[in-house]
Amino acid sequence: MTKAVISGIGPDQPGIVAAIADILYKRGCNIVDSTMTRLANEFAVILIINAPNSVRFPDLKAEFATLEESHNMTVVIKPIPDNIGMDFHKPENPYMISVAGQDQAGITYKISRKLAEMDINITDLNAQCIQGDEGPVYIMMVEIDIPNSMAVGSLQKEIQEIAREIGLEIQLRPLEAVAL
């Protein structure tokens, strides 16, 4: 098996996921990780796939060229070198940071910068601006992996300082492990 990252973006419309899955299924590819979402009126997708050794990525790219034309998308295929394993990392200490407040420039920057300074890994981030009673409201959910060696209280103190500084509500809570 060979591995690749496939990313794409284009106008949101019914059938995009089915078209992508159809191309991969017919080639015997397996989607092992994915993120697909609608952002405003755009659809964005990132996939990690395992492909049979018989699949050549230039041929796969040619098949996606049809999708690019029919759905007005841009698709990029990036092979993952064989010496890089598929890291199904189990977070040491998963937490969720939820942010809500009046929309303003710098919210994502200030929180992500503080997390980087504290060597805390962001594993997922979703944000959007919604209309509130008093104007645009920024909502952000950030999944993080706090090193076991770090006191959670020190992170709590730092994010509350950011909350006071820019007038946001920020909450930190542990994420429960899901057993399958």
Image: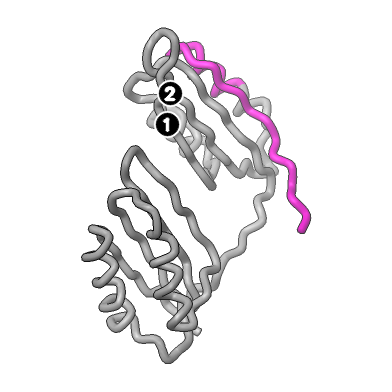
Numbered badge on residue 109: none
> How far from the left and from the top, in percent, is residue 117?
47, 36
Instruction: Tell me the residue that label 2 is attached to.
Output: 138
Q: Are marks 2 and 1 in contact (CB under 8 Å)?
A: yes
Query: Mark 1: which amino acid?
Result: Gln
User: Is residue 83 at all visible to an observer of this figure?
Assistant: no
> How far from the left and from the top, in percent, is residue 138?
43, 23
Vertical relation: 23 (above or below) 100: below
Vertical relation: 126 (above or below) 74: above
Instruction: Tell me the residue that label 1 is attached to.
Output: 128
Query: Mark 2: which amino acid?
Result: Tyr
Answer with the quarter of the image where residue 94 lies.
top right
User: Is residue 135 at all visible to an observer of this figure?
Assistant: yes
Q: Could you classify mark 2 by the number of other residues whose Cα lies within 10 Å: few (under 14), some (14-19), or many (20 or more)?
A: many
Vertical relation: 60 (above or below) 156: below
Determine whether, in the image, residue 89 is placed left or right of residue 50.
right
Q: Nearer the viewer, residue 174 or 64?
A: 64
Determine whether, in the image, residue 45 is placed left or right of residue 140.
left
Task: Please tell me whether mark 2 sits on a helix, a strand or a loop.
Answer: strand
Residue furthest out toward the top: 134
Q: Residue at x 29, y 75 (%)?
A: 61
Task: Please tell me whether mark 1 sits on a helix, a strand or a loop.
Answer: strand
Magenta stretch bounds: 157-180
Q: Quadrant of the C terminus?
A: bottom right
Answer with the quarter of the image where residue 157 lies.
top right
> How far from the left and from the top, in percent, is residue 30?
52, 75
